[in-house]
Image (spheres, grey):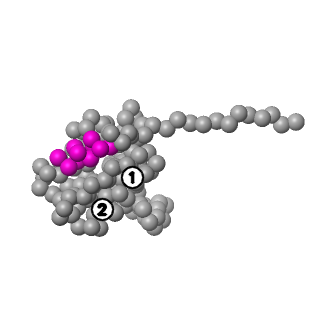
Amino acid sequence: MSQHHAPQVQTKASITRDSALALAVAARDAATKTGLNLAIAITDEGGHLIAFERADATPFLAAEVAVNKAWTAASFGLDTMIWNQVVAQPATAPLANHPRVMPVGGGVPIVVGGRVVGGIGISGGNAQQDHDVAVAALTAAGFEVAK
């Protein structure tokens, strides 16, 4: 006779809409200080878009790239600058074939209490500029910055 076990569930932490919107404003402020026209995307821990904006003069491709950077950062809790190194390794190179993986700087996990609660993706500058704006926004909005 088999024993029945009660189903188990887990509780996941996720950024709220209000916090995502505040983070987007912090990113816009950081972008304005640099003089860059950027796309800004904020996802929850599952990579689902919560907040988005694109400056008027931002190239349209930057919109999709920003969303995919945020998705990539949230997926494994890794900065997309690190993803660039991950997909350069033969054992993990096939991950670069995933249509949403964006291994280019500018995607940073959103972390609270050591837990990934979402991702921020910035696109429109070069990889370092996008990364720096994401980190500045996270810091200004009071989030942890994963090291």
* Residue 84 pos. (x, y %): 35, 59
Q: Tell me the tag on residue 63.
A: 2
Instruction: Please tell me whether residue 100 is drawn above or below residue 135 in the rendered image.
Output: below
Which residue sits at x=19%, y=62%? 56
Q: What residue type is disc 1 on? A: Leu
Residue 25 is one of the magenta-drawn residues: yes
- Which stretch is magenta? 20-29
Quadrant where the C terminus sits is: top left
User: Tag 1: Cα neighbours inside 10 Å, few (<14), some, or many (≥20)?
Assistant: many
Task: Say which of 63 and 115 sits in front.
Answer: 63
- Residue ranking furthest to the right: 1
Task: Say which of 40 and 2 sits in front.
Answer: 40
Instruction: Please tell me whether residue 86 is drawn above or below residue 6 in the rendered image.
Output: below
Write down the residue under mark 1.
49
Which residue sits at x=11%, y=55%? 35
* Residue 105 pos. (x, y %): 29, 56
Quadrant where the N terminus sits is: top right
Any part of residue 85 in sight: no
Residue 27 is one of the magenta-drawn residues: yes
* Residue 113 pos. (x, y %): 39, 32
Q: SS for tag 1?
A: strand
Which residue sits at x=30%, y=62%? 63
| Tags 1 and 2 touching, CB below 8 Å | no
In this picture, residue 141 sits left or right of residue 116: left
The answer for how far apart the CA atoms under marks 1 and 2 are is 12 Å
Mark nearer the N terminus (1 vs 2) = 1
User: Tag 2: Cα neighbours inside 10 Å, few (<14), some, or many (≥20)?
Assistant: many
Q: What residue type is disc 2 on? A: Ala
Task: Say which of 93 and 73 sits in front.
Answer: 73
Query: Hey, which quadrant is residue 137 in on the image?
Result: top left
Which residue sits at x=27%, y=67%? 60
